Image (spheres, rainbow, N blue to C red):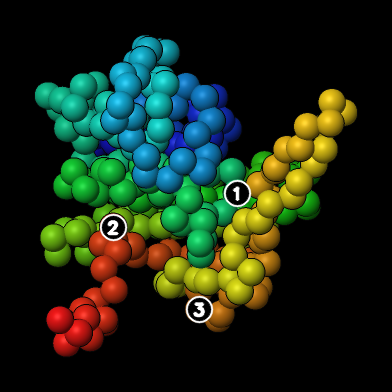
Amino acid sequence: MRILITNDDGISAPGLAVLEAIANDLAGPDGEVWIVAPAYEQSGVSHCISYIHPMLLTKAGERRYAVEGSPADCVLAGLFDVLKDTPPDLVLSGVNRGHNVAEEVLYSGTIGGAIEATLQGFKAISMSQYYSPQSVKSDDPFEAARNRGAGICRRLLDDGKWHDQPYGVFYNINFPAIPAADIKGVKAAVQGRRPDGSFGIKPQVAPNGRRYLWVSANSQNTSAGAGTDAREAAEGWITVTPLRADMTAHDLVSDIAELF
């Protein structure tokens, strides 16, 4: 199996090393793992692409490339330049430092990489590791993802649905911020909604008198409903959410037709 991996935390991020280990497990001894990742952190860029300017591609090692661009740019570079003659069987994005659930799915560059791969007709899985004040201090904050990631991906590859509709499915996996031994199990979950949303603004006046605005997180995952990615992963479950890039509100199409 040939696997292309990317992330939004940057090519030097520890979560990318975890994803590389997961990918090597999946690919097997005769497989190949190729890294095409952002040269620097691209968190929060969603599915943006560098449409109006070129991006620098640098070889950083064997099967390892850095792109001055977004995760979606990296996927495009991987598919149509680095691996243009030998396309991958799978694209993996992550393992993100911190969760990508609920509203964050719309902001996440990790998700954006998976979306681009899916739009291009490839199987894609994004992975994110919850963080907590306790897990940050642990020897391995990515332990849950490191221990369970390959097995869940393998199950999805064997039995999951993929390109069964014009907009194919990709899978978003979130690992709880607890030791692997304490994980309650794996749950299918819907994308959640937190009443206060994900982000707000915190103003700050600098010593020079200028006013700056910081984006601040409003992460109250337990406020999301039961059965959602935000709630279940916060309570110790690994969540798997099938997603599509189609943003049509299908339940309202007939209502709009009646208006016109």
Quarter of the image that includes the N terminus: top left
In the rendered image, residue 41, in percent from the top left (x then y), is placed at 53, 30
Q: Is residue 246 left or right of residue 9?
A: left
Residue located 74% across and 49% down the image: 202
Label 3 vs 1, first from the N-terminus: 1
Above/below status of 154 relative to 10: below
Place residue 51 in its image quadrant: top left
The crowding category of the residue bearing disc 1, from other C-alpha atoms within 10 Å (few below 14, some 14 to 19, many at least 20), is some
Q: How far apart in space, not on screen, are marks 2 and 1 (Cα)?
A: 22 Å
Whether residue 186 is visible, yes or no, is: no
Residue located 44% across and 55% down the image: 106
- Identify which residue, 232 or 8, lies in the foreground: 8
Q: Tell me the tag on residue 227.
A: 3
Place residue 53 in its image quadrant: top left
Residue position marked by numbered label 2 in the rendering = 245
- Identify which residue, 253 or 70, lies in the foreground: 253
Secondary structure, mark 2, is: loop
The crowding category of the residue bearing disc 2, from other C-alpha atoms within 10 Å (few below 14, some 14 to 19, many at least 20), is some
Identity, as a three-letter code, of the amino acid under mark 3: Gly
Identity, as a three-letter code, of the amino acid under mark 1: Gly
Q: Are marks 3 and 2 in contact (CB under 8 Å)?
A: no
Residue located 19% across and 27% down the image: 80
Residue position marked by numbered label 1 in the rendering = 98
Identity, as a three-letter code, of the amino acid under mark 2: Ala
Q: Nearer the viewer, mark 2 or mark 1?
A: 2
Q: Is residue 112 left or right of residue 137?
A: left
Q: How many marks?
A: 3
